[in-house]
Amino acid sequence: MKNRKESDHPDFWEERYRAERLPWDLGAEPVELASALVSEFRPAGRVLIPGCGSGYEVRSFVAAGWEVCAIDFAPAAVARAQRILGPLGDRVQQADFFTSELSGPFDLVYERTFLCSLPPERWPHYAARMTSLLRPGGWLAGVFFYGTDPEPPPHPLSPETAHRLFGSHFRLHVDRPVSAGQSLPIYGGAERWQIWQLLPDPVP
C-alpha cells in the first residue's frame, strides 16, 4: 500500500477506492467538526474540501448553511462520495487541488489528513495553494497527522515542519488531539484537530 512515489497521482488512490481498501476512512464526520460548526465556524460562508474521499462532511456543512465545493482527483472516490451523499452528490466534483481552476476565495478550507497523503516535497505547494484560495482572515481547519511513520504514506508532520509551512502566513488558533474513538489504526492516535487562520499580511 505504501508507495511514496505514487501517492500524489490519481491512480494510487483509484486502485484503493475500487478495491475498497480504505484504512483512512472514518465512516463519519469527526466530532470536532460537528462542534466547530456550531461554536466557531460562524457565520456560514464558502468552504472547499480538497481530497474529500467519501465526503461525509459535506452533509454537515450543507446543514449548517455553508456553500460547499468538495473535490477529489480519483474518479472512484468521487463516485463513492456521490453515492453516499445522494441528492447532495452534486457538491462533489473531480478536480485536482493543485492544477484545477477553483472558484475562490473561500472562507474555510477543511481537510481530513489530506496533507499527509502527499509526499513532503509537495507540502510547500500545498501551503502556497492554501494562501491563494483563502480570503484574508479565512480558516484552514481539520485533522492533521503528527508523529512518525517508517513506511509512508501517510506522511506525518512535526511541529517544526508545520511552523515552516504555515508560520509566515497563518496563526495557529486551535490545536488539540482528536477525541477518543476518533483516531484510526493507520494514524496510531497521532491525529490533531487544528484550526489555522490566514493572516492579512505575511509575518516577516
Image (cartoon, grey):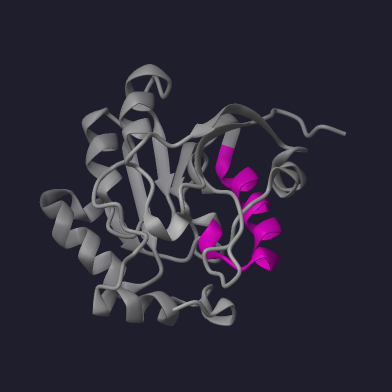
Q: Residue at x 27, y 44 (%)?
A: 58
Q: Which residue is drawn at 66% across and 59% down?
A: 123
Q: Residue at x 21, y 32 (%)?
A: 63
Give the percent coordinates (x, y) of residue 108: 47, 36
Q: What are the residue bounds of the magenta stretch?
A: 116-134
Quadrant position of the N terminus in the picture = bottom left
Give the percent coordinates (x, y) of residue 23: 34, 64
Residue 123 in magenta?
yes
Q: Which residue lies furthest to the left in this view?
A: 87
Q: Is 194 left, or right, of 120 in this rendering?
A: left
Give the percent coordinates (x, y) of residue 46: 40, 36
Q: Which residue is drawn at 25% across and 79% down?
A: 19
Q: Quadrant of residue 22?
A: bottom left
Q: Is the magenta stretch mostly helix, strand or loop?
A: helix
- Vertical arrangement, residue 25 with respect to residue 12, above or below: above
Q: Is 7 left, or right, of 22 in this rendering?
A: right
- Vertical arrangement, residue 22 with respect to residue 15, above or below: above
Q: Is 77 left, or right, of 132 in this rendering?
A: left
Residue 79 in magenta?
no
- Vertical arrangement, residue 150 with respect to residue 145, above or below: below
Q: In which quarter of the image is residue 54?
A: bottom left
* Residue nearest the observer in this picture, 44 or 192: 192
Q: In which quarter of the image is residue 24?
A: bottom left
